Image (tube, rainbow, N blue to C red):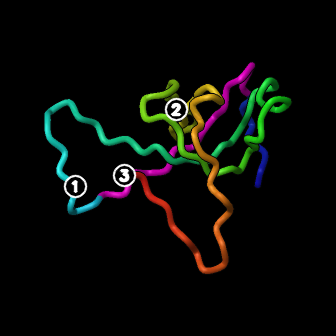
Amino acid sequence: MQTFPLRTHFERVIIKVEPVQSESNILIMGDDVEKKSTIGTILAIGPMVERDSTIRPGDRVLFRKFSGETFTWEGEEYLLAMASDVLITFPKPKEHGSTLRSI
């Protein structure tokens, strides 16, 4: 994995959020309901995360739905969140290509 050029501080992580996969059998009700993905890839971790956690750049993770702050850098959108907002680290995909999707 190529090194991500931005660094974060303290116990924060930078996540590249995966696009939401639309499902034809999901009904979202209400005008202000926003469907957000909660799966992404860790791109950078702060120094406090490095010493206290098993989260590493390149990990595919599940994070809290309304966590952190989104920001745009060089035309790409990222999430800056606390390491404690990361709930699950998924295992690396196997040869047969298991897939995970946000619900």
In the rendered image, the vertical position of residue 89 relative to residue 24, given as above or below: above
Outermost residue to the right = 51
Is 99 on the left or on the right of 46, as rendered? left
Instruction: Depth check: give the residue in front, 90 or 3.
Output: 90
Instruction: Depth check: give the residue in front, 6 or 63.
Output: 63
User: Which structural element holds mark 2?
Assistant: strand
User: Would residue 13 be counted in the magenta stretch?
Assistant: yes
Q: Amino acid at mark 1?
A: Ile
Is 34 on the left or on the right of 7, as rendered? left
Q: What secondary structure is the magenta-colored segment mainly?
A: loop
User: Would residue 96 be counted in the magenta stretch?
Assistant: no
Q: Quadrant of residue 11?
A: top right
Q: How dense is the environment of label 2, judged by Cα within 10 Å: few (below 14), some, or many (20 and up)? A: few
User: Which structural element holds mark 1?
Assistant: loop
Disc nearer the start of the sequence (1/2): 1
In the rendered image, the vertical position of residue 10 relative to residue 61, given as above or below: above
Q: Nearer the viewer, mark 2 or mark 3?
A: 3
Outermost residue to the bottom = 96
- CA–CA distance between discs 1 and 2? 28 Å
On-image quarter of the N terminus:
bottom right
Outermost residue to the left = 30
- CA–CA distance between discs 1 and 3? 9 Å
Q: Which residue is at a point 54% across and 45% down the rendered structure image?
A: 62
Query: Where is residue 25 drawn, in percent x and y?
Result: 20, 61
Residue position marked by numbered label 1 in the rendering: 26
Residue position marked by numbered label 2 in the rendering: 72
Q: Which residues are magenta?
A: 8-22
Disc nearer the start of the sequence (2/3): 2
What number of labels is visible?
3
Residue position marked by numbered label 3 in the rendering: 103
Q: Which residue is at a point 82% across and 32% down the rendered structure image?
A: 50
Query: Where is residue 92 drawn, in percent x and y?
Result: 68, 62
